[in-house]
Amino acid sequence: MILVHAGFKVELAHSADEFQDRTASSSYALLVICHSVPEAEKQVILEAVSPSSSSVLAVPTLQPPNTFLSQVQQLLA
């Protein structure tokens, strides 16, 4: 919701399989992995991402909205 309210287009994947399906057919400027994603799924996602295809922001803990938005903006600049 934070990214949507800031004007970003957002698509959600609720599992590593759904993530792989989405990234197989589309490219993304930034992939955000929430702190609530289980470690095993994070590893599957990170291994599936080509280093040159997208930036990845793995959020380790719940953060204040302004901190999160700043990180996103820096990665997309």
Image (tube, rainbow, N blue to C red):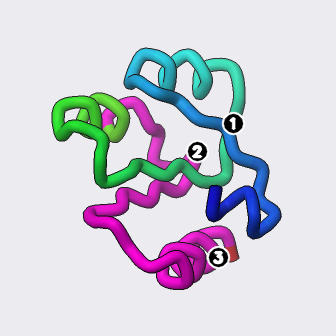
The image quadrant of residue 23 is top right
Between 65 and 57, the residue placed more toward the observer is: 65
Residue occupying image coordinates x 29% and y 46%: 36
Q: Which residue in the protein does label 2 denote?
A: 53
Q: Which residue in the protein does label 1 denote?
A: 27
Residue occupying image coordinates x 36% and y 57%: 58
Q: Position of residue 25 (x, y in %)?
A: 68, 19
Q: Which residue in the protein does label 3 denote?
A: 73
Q: Is residue 30 left or right of residue 42?
A: right
Q: Position of residue 55 (x, y in %)?
A: 53, 56
Between 45 and 3, the residue placed more toward the observer is: 3
Residue occupying image coordinates x 60% and y 53%: 30
Name the amino acid, label 1.
Answer: Ser
Mark 2–mark 1 Cα distance, whole angstroms, equals 7 Å
Circle 3 packing at 10 Å, graded few (<14), some (14-19), many (20+), is: few
Q: Nearer the viewer, mark 1 or mark 3?
A: 3
Q: Is residue 54 left or right of residue 4?
A: left
- Whether residue 33 appears in magenta in the rendering, the answer is no
Q: Position of residue 38 (x, y in %)?
A: 22, 37
Mark 3–mark 2 Cα distance, whole angstroms, equals 17 Å
Name the amino acid, label 2.
Answer: Ser
Q: For the residue labelled by badge 2, is the local secondary structure a helix, a strand or a loop? A: loop
Residue occupying image coordinates x 34% and y 40%: 46
Considering only vertical position in the picture, is 19 above or below 69?
above
Give the magenta-colored segment's residue range.
47-76
Tell me which label, 3 or 2, sits earlier in the chain: 2
Q: Is residue 33 left or right of residue 10?
A: left
Q: Is residue 15 left or right of residue 32?
A: left
Name the amino acid, label 3.
Answer: Gln
